[in-house]
Image (spheres, rainbow, N blue to C red):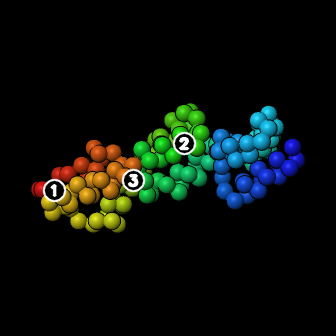
Amino acid sequence: MNELKARALRFLARREYSKAELRSRLSEGEGEADEVLAELEKEGWLSDARFVDQLLDARLGRYGREHVLHELRSKGIGEELISAALPRIMEAEREALRSVWEKKFGKLPADRKEMGKQVRFLQSRGFSLEEILQLIGNSKT
């Protein structure tokens, strides 16, 4: 168990991990891993809430709501933490959309082909079609 805890601490020394993500990395004896994870949580080394904050800090300026929510769910974050983070995500989305659009394109699309290119790019970053069209769709194309 001490070896398993040491491995877990080495992982956590590099970056934050969600509990589910760290469990899959350790994946030795299921019971042993759960004991180590519980101990790490109790000692403050492992925190899903802290992981969510770190992920939001890293992603919110560059990605939309759908991308961020998908990533949180794929990392095993519970719906209660996602619900708590949703207002912060929603607040940052419009500003992030404008920032990403200005950095990549900077001007309204000249024709339908260009508009499609901009919309597809922004959707691939996790922004909603409704928000994208509010930003660029009101041009005379």
Relative to 134, 53 lies left or right = right
What's the residue type where badge 2 is placed?
Answer: Ser
Residue drawn at point x = 28 percent, y = 44 percent: 130
Local crowd at mark 2 within 10 Å, few (<14), some, or many (≥20)? few
The label number, if any, that marks residue 49 in the structure image:
none
Q: Quadrant of the C terminus?
A: bottom left
Which numbered disc flags the more N-terminal residue, 3 or 1? 1
- Residue 93 seen anywhere in this rendered image of the structure: no
The label number, if any, that marks residue 125 in the structure image:
3
Q: Is residue 58 above or below residue 66?
A: below
Q: Quadrant of the N terminus?
A: top right
The number of discs equals 3
Relative to 13, 81 lies left or right = left
Which numbered disc flags the more N-terminal residue, 2 or 3? 2
Residue located beneath label 2 in the image: 74
Residue drawn at point x = 36 percent, y = 60 percent: 100
Residue closer to the observer: 45 or 95: 45
Local crowd at mark 1 within 10 Å, few (<14), some, or many (≥20)? few
Alpha-carbon span between mark 3 and mark 1: 20 Å
Task: State the image coordinates of residue 120 (x, y, percent, origin top left).
Answer: 30, 53
Residue located beneath label 1 in the image: 112
Q: Residues at badges 2 and 1 in contact (C-beta under 8 Å)?
A: no
- Residue 123 seen anywhere in this rendered image of the structure: yes
What's the residue type where badge 3 is placed?
Answer: Arg
Is label 2 in a helix, a strand or a loop? helix
Task: State the image coordinates of residue 98 (x, y, percent, origin top left).
Answer: 33, 58
Task: State the image coordinates of residue 136 (x, y, percent, origin top left).
Answer: 23, 55
Relative to 141, 26 lies left or right = right
Residue closer to the observer: 122 or 52: 122
Residue closer to the observer: 17 or 28: 28
Is label 1 in a helix, a strand or a loop? helix
